[in-house]
Amino acid sequence: MLRDGVRLFVDSKRNTSAYTVDEMSKLFLLNRYLFDVPARFKTEGPPTFGGWLGIPSGENWIDLLWPLGIANDGNLMLRDYFRGYSGPDFPALEEFDAFAKSLAAADSGI
């Protein structure tokens, strides 16, 4: 049901030429809120989604949780600010699917 909501949101914004960075940002944060994504994700040339500027990364890792973080009480918090966006539209649904697949694999012990 959540996936359908994301799809409908993207479709409605694109149909009215209103899929702006403001709208894409909402889905970017939603995906991080919904899924238990790690702050430090090991990668070899990450399958990143979108052209968000300022995402912390290093050699073979990227902070998938950014701009969110974990507060001292264990809750999610906004820990950084928007620094810009570059490139094609944020593929929110594709990122949603990738996070859902990773979560399902982690739950199954794969």
Image (spheres, grey):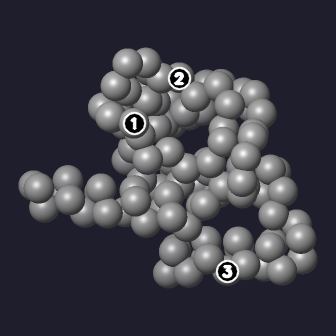
Which mark is in front, 1 or 3? 1
Q: Is residue 88 left or right of residue 34?
A: right
Q: For mark 3, does the 10 Å Cα neighbourhood hold few (<14), some (14 to 19), or many (20 or more) residues?
A: few
Disc 3 and disc 2 in contact, CB within 8 angstroms: no
- Where disc 1 sits, the SS reads loop
Q: Tell me the distance, in whole angstroms, between the alpha carbons under discs 1 and 3.
A: 30 Å
Q: Tell me the distance, in whole angstroms, between the alpha carbons under discs 1 and 2.
A: 14 Å
Which mark is in front, 1 or 2? 1
- Where disc 3 sits, the SS reads helix
Residue at horizontal 32%, vertical 34%?
44
In the image, residue 59 sits, relative to residue 78, either above or below, namely above
Residue beneath disc 2: 56
Residue beneath disc 3: 8
Q: Earlier in the sequence, mark 1 or mark 3?
A: 3
Residue beneath disc 1: 45
- Amino acid type at mark 3: Leu
Q: Point out residue 23 in the picture as x, y percentages from the top left corner.
A: 78, 57
Q: Earlier in the sequence, mark 3 or mark 2?
A: 3
Is residue 52 in view?
Answer: yes
